[in-house]
Image: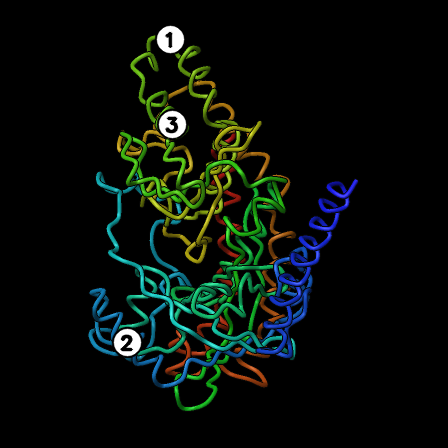
Amino acid sequence: MKKYFGIVLLLIIGLGCQKQNTDEVSTDATTANPDWTEASHSNNGEPDYAMVFPQEKVNTIEITLGKAIWEKIKTDMVAKGKGTFGVGGNAGGGGNPAGGPGGNPGGGGPGGNAGGVPDFGDEPEYFESTIKFNGKTWNNVGFRLKGNSTLSSTWKSGIYKLPFRLKFDEFEDQYPEIKNQRLYGFKDLSFSAAVKDNSLIREKVTADIFRMAGIPAAQTAFYKVYIDFGEGQKYCGIYTTVELIDDTMLKNQLGEDDGNIYKPESTFSSFNKDNFEKKNNEDAADWSDVQNTVTALNATNRTSDPTAWRTNLEKYMNMEHFVKWLAVNTTLVNWDTYGAMAHNHYLYNHSTQKLLWIPWDNNEALTSNARVNLNLSGVNNSWPLIKYVADDPVYYAKYKAYVKDFNTNVFTTSKMNQLFENATNLITPYVNGSEKEVSPYSNLSSLSNFTAALPILKQHVVTRNKLVEEFVK
């Protein structure tokens, strides 16, 4: 009996210690930051989409870097081979070719270069920042610049409206009081600066269009962004905040996120694990799902026994979903992705749906700069996922049907005009109204370019609708 009571007593003491430790972490965080609440700062609550990604208003976020951190960022960019801030670019503005006419509205030429795999070097480092949002403060938040050509052109032009990411628990090892720090349930957020988009809405509305068409895509919202680079808060204009695929998006839209998540930079012509960056399950060191996909895609029976080829390929990759994405992506014209450059998408290995193609980084969509023809002609073997869909009668018939369905039911002038107008009206007061985007805190070379962008977007839809009607006859 004494032994029994001894065991019970030890259990009670142990549970009490566990509770005490939990309370101590919470107390430490609250003491260090009186704004800390479970809903706003901890990882215990569900992601609050209404708070962080509102669709009917523009949020405001204030970021304090300070002079010392800003100098560290500039030093890091030089060390990473990104150049010196304000040197080597166009100091008059970012240009924004996506905002105006140009290119071949008929659908462009062959599907990109033969290489396809970009080499952008090392990513910039994270540095500490302080965030103010919704009347609360988040301390020691990781801030880093992001992007490739968009970052390069802005950086070298000396424009402070730079694309960046926030990671709220990046420095939890150095600052234990922010362990598992979140922004209303979100660990990471990406901020797109619309570097090549005079409309400032392409990143936002393209993600909306994908979801309207049944293609899972990250949630987006507009933000007014203020940044202190060491001389007080400066208004850096309208950004589009984008949900991270490997943070909350998969769980929210697909109901799971335990499968392998990849951010590929591969043409899929051959397998190299270095071209399939893992975003989770790194310790498992298992790339068999994507390796089997690449092997099946490039199998020699593709022409001799297409039925067997399709059956084997579909063991690993959800080709129905890929063909649908291809139809939507090609119709609306989203060139800066697979077919021109081997980047700007994710792959997720779903427990029942196999490998799913997830779009990403849509700031150069909805332009006339098409790299893949609507009928997929001219795409070479460097892009086998597109080339082999075009060559296979079964997949090509599905592709054509999806193009027609998207054009008829989603990509209509009435739906797109409403989408574009709503987004433009929402941000206009903060671009060219009560608050204005001005140099060097804007990528707009002229506010008149913003005004002219909406009609160009609307005309783009009209042009693509006509091309589709001819294609599906």
Q: Name the residue under label 1.
A: 305
Between 111 and 146, the one lying in front of the other is: 146
Q: Which residue is drawn at 26% across and 42% down?
A: 116
* Residue beneath disc 2: 74
Q: How many labels does the image show?
A: 3
Residue 473 appearing in the image: no
For the residues labelled 3 and 1, the Cα–Cα distance comes to 24 Å
Q: Which of marks 2 and 3 is nearer the N terminus?
A: 2
Q: Earlier in the sequence, mark 1 or mark 2?
A: 2
Q: Tag 2's secondary structure?
A: helix
Residue 288: image tag = 3
Q: Which of 287 and 345 is in front in this view?
A: 287
Badge 1 crowding class, 10 Å Cα cut-off, few under 14, some 14 to 19, many 20 or more, is few
The secondary structure type at the circle numbered 3 is helix
Q: How far apart are the alpha carbons under marks 1 and 2?
A: 56 Å
Can residue 6 be seen in the rendering of this structure? yes
Q: Which residue is at the far top?
A: 305
Q: Which residue lies furthest to the front in this view?
A: 2
Q: Residue type at mark 2?
A: Lys
> In the rendered view of the protein, which quadrant contains the N terminus?
top right
Where does residue 45 sit, x and y in percent of width and height? 68, 58
Indicate the position of residue 424 as horizontal and vertical percent values.
Answer: 58, 68
